[in-house]
Amino acid sequence: MERDALVRVAATGGYGTVYSVEEGVCEVALIDPQAEEDFLSVPQAMVEPLERAYPESMGELAGRLALLHLRVSCGAAAGGGFEAFVGRTEDDALELWWAEGNHRARRVSHLEGGQASALASALRGLDLEPWEHGGGAPARPGGWHWSLECAGAGMGASGFGHDGAPEGLRDVVEALAGMGLPLVWDDEGPRLA
C-alpha cells in the first residue's frame, strides 16, 4: 500500500490517507471533521484501498459521493485558510462542514437537491490525475496551497498543488460558495470572501 493512498477504514467506517505502513500496521490520516484524533494506527487488513478514479469515472464517483474534503492555505497566515467537507450521513443525506483558519470544523447544513446536483456537476469536470503527486508552481511566501480528496462508488481521487489548480477546481469552489460558504475565486485563486 502506497503512502498517500486513499482508503476506507473499517474501524471507523470513514476514509483517510495512508501516512505510513510498517510491519502490517497502517497509520492513517483520517478525513473526518468529527474525528477526535487526526491519525489512527490500524492493522493493514482493516484498511481497504479505494480504486483510483480517473477523469472518465468522476461522473460515477460524483453520483455516489461519500466524501469531499478541500483544504486551502493562503500564504503564511493560518487565518486565511479554510476547509470544507461534504460527507454522506447514515440516512443517505449529504452534510456540509466548514472551518476557517485553525478552528475546528462545524456542521453548516444538509445539502438541498440543487446544491448536491451543482457539486456533482462540478466534480464530473474535475481532473485530479495530473495533480495526484502535486503540481503548480514551487511553493512561495504569500502563495496559496490546496489539497482535495473525494471518495464515492468505491473509488477515490486526490491531488494537491501550489499557486495553480486542476481543471474543474474553480467549479468545485464555486459550487461550495453556492451553498453559502464565504468563498470567492479571483486572479489569485480561491480565498475567503
Image (cartoon, rainbow, N blue to C red):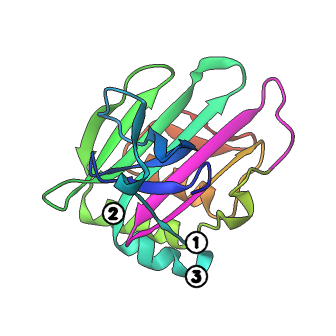
Say how many tags the image has. 3
Kindly check if marks 1 and 2 are in contact, taking CB atoms under 8 A apart as contact: no
Q: Residue at x 72, y 34 (%)?
A: 144
Q: Is residue 181 magenta?
A: no
Residue 95 higher or lower than 27, as above or below: below
- State which region is magenta: 136-158
Residue 78: image quadrant is: top right
Q: Is residue 174 above or below residue 30?
A: below
Q: Position of residue 46 (x, y in %)?
A: 35, 53
Q: Quadrant for residue 158, please give it.
A: bottom right
Q: Which residue is mark 2?
A: 116
What kind of element bears circle 3? helix
User: Is the C terminus in the top left, top right, bottom left or bottom right quadrant?
Assistant: top right
**Which label is found at residue 2?**
none
Viewer-side label of 3, 1: 3
Q: Earlier in the sequence, mark 1 or mark 2?
A: 2
Please, what is the three-letter code of the amino acid marked with disc 3? Answer: Glu
Q: Answer with left or right where residue 40 lies relative to residue 6.
A: left
Identify the amino acid type marked 2: Ala
In space, the residues marked 2 and 3 are separated at their CA atoms by: 20 Å
The crowding category of the residue bearing disc 2, from other C-alpha atoms within 10 Å (few below 14, some 14 to 19, many at least 20), is many
* Residue matched to label 1: 125
| Residue 6 image position (x, y, % from top left) | 50, 56
Measured Cα–Cα span from mark 1 to mark 2: 15 Å
Kind of residue at disc 1: Gly
Question: For the view shown, which residue lies furthest in the front direction?
Answer: 23
